[in-house]
Amino acid sequence: MDIKLRNLLAEHVSRLEALNFSPTTIRSRVYNVRAFLAWVEERYGVTAPHHLNVAHLRSWQRALSRHRTSHGLPLKPRSVNKFIECVRGFLTDLHEAGHVPNQMINALQYVKVPDLLPKALMHRQVKDLLSRLDTSTPEGHRDRAMLELLYSSGLRAAELLGLSQDDIDFSAGAVRVMGKGRKERVVPVGETALRFLESYLRGVRSLLGRGNTELAVFLDKNGNRMPYHTLRRIVQRIGKDAGLKEPLTAHVFRRSCTSELVRGNANLYHVSRMLGHESLETLKHYVKLNITDIQRTHRETHPREQDEQRRLGEETDPGDTQPDES
């Protein structure tokens, strides 16, 4: 009797759990692999690993490139690569178990991701956005504390929502978070964020969770640990109220924090450790973001550039009739 691909998916999940992948990552991988298995079964009737071949995989990847979202847009390269990463991981397990040959894995190729600068807000934009929040209400004060912490420490949304009260060390000015791969790290928190966080915990949080034994730092309107969809809705509303053209996400605050640190010439190794990155490679886009500041500094401080500015000023002076002899 043929072993089914869907049954082998359960073994793949067990391996991911053994490697300490987060529940969120595992759910995402399972969702993507199931979508792939449903496609090859519907299109080619493939349900067992020995029926799967390279042609099926390449056909599926072409279908990904033709896929359109509910808004009629193609999948972003990063989304395509996420599908490929999940399926390649599944195929790797199948190969190691002797179900498929190695060339099956290499049949799926990652697509090139455009070398774009990350979306981030300037500091003045963040200040304006945060100042608009009404901290006279429990919900408004909670939201201000959340966003101040996101911007100050560059936490991921899951790390923010996973915080419990004993994860915060006010004396050390830091929080303990559980990052990707179930890796724990300690992250510094700035004075402003600490101030809002402390006032929220001491005088506001109890108003949201009356009689509740929940240990989470950030609570929803029912006094329970805030779920991601609630955070997403709150942040989107705040961005819309501030008049931002594009939808605001919690991750924008992480990017904005990173941009400001790099712009301030922070040690990239320290920034990488603070953010929980595996390598410095992730910061390469932010280093490019800093070139505009370098160019402005060069223009404003290099003596030859100052000579040029004076020359241009003299040329536009209607009372000046002398030629430039510099």
Image: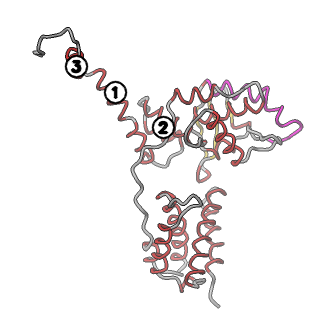
**In the rendered view, does 269 fall on the left or right side of 326?**
right
For the image, the number of numbered tags is 3
Q: Cβ–Cβ below 8 Å for labels 1 and 3?
A: no
Element marked by disc 2 = helix
Dot label at residue 296: 1
Element marked by disc 3 = helix
Residue linked to disc 3: 312
Above or below residue 256? Residue 58 is below
Of tags 3 and 2, which is closer to the observer? 3
Name the image quarter holding the C terminus.
top left
Instruction: Name the residue located 43 percent from the left edge and 77 percent from the top edge.
Output: 103
Bounds of the magenta segment: 192-214
Q: Amino acid at mark 1?
A: Arg
**In the rendered view, does 267 fall on the left or right side of 231?**
left
State the CA–CA distance, disc 1 to disc 3: 17 Å
Q: Amino acid at mark 3?
A: Leu
Above or below residue 78? Residue 199 is above
Name the image quarter holding the N terminus.
bottom right
Of tags 1 and 3, which is closer to the observer? 3
Does label 1 or label 2 sit earlier along the sequence? 2
Instruction: Name the residue located 57 percent from the left edge and 36 percent from the top edge.
Output: 244
Residue linked to disc 2: 271
Instruction: Name the residue located 57 percent from the left edge and 83 percent from the top edge.
Output: 46
Location of residue 166 by image quarter: top right
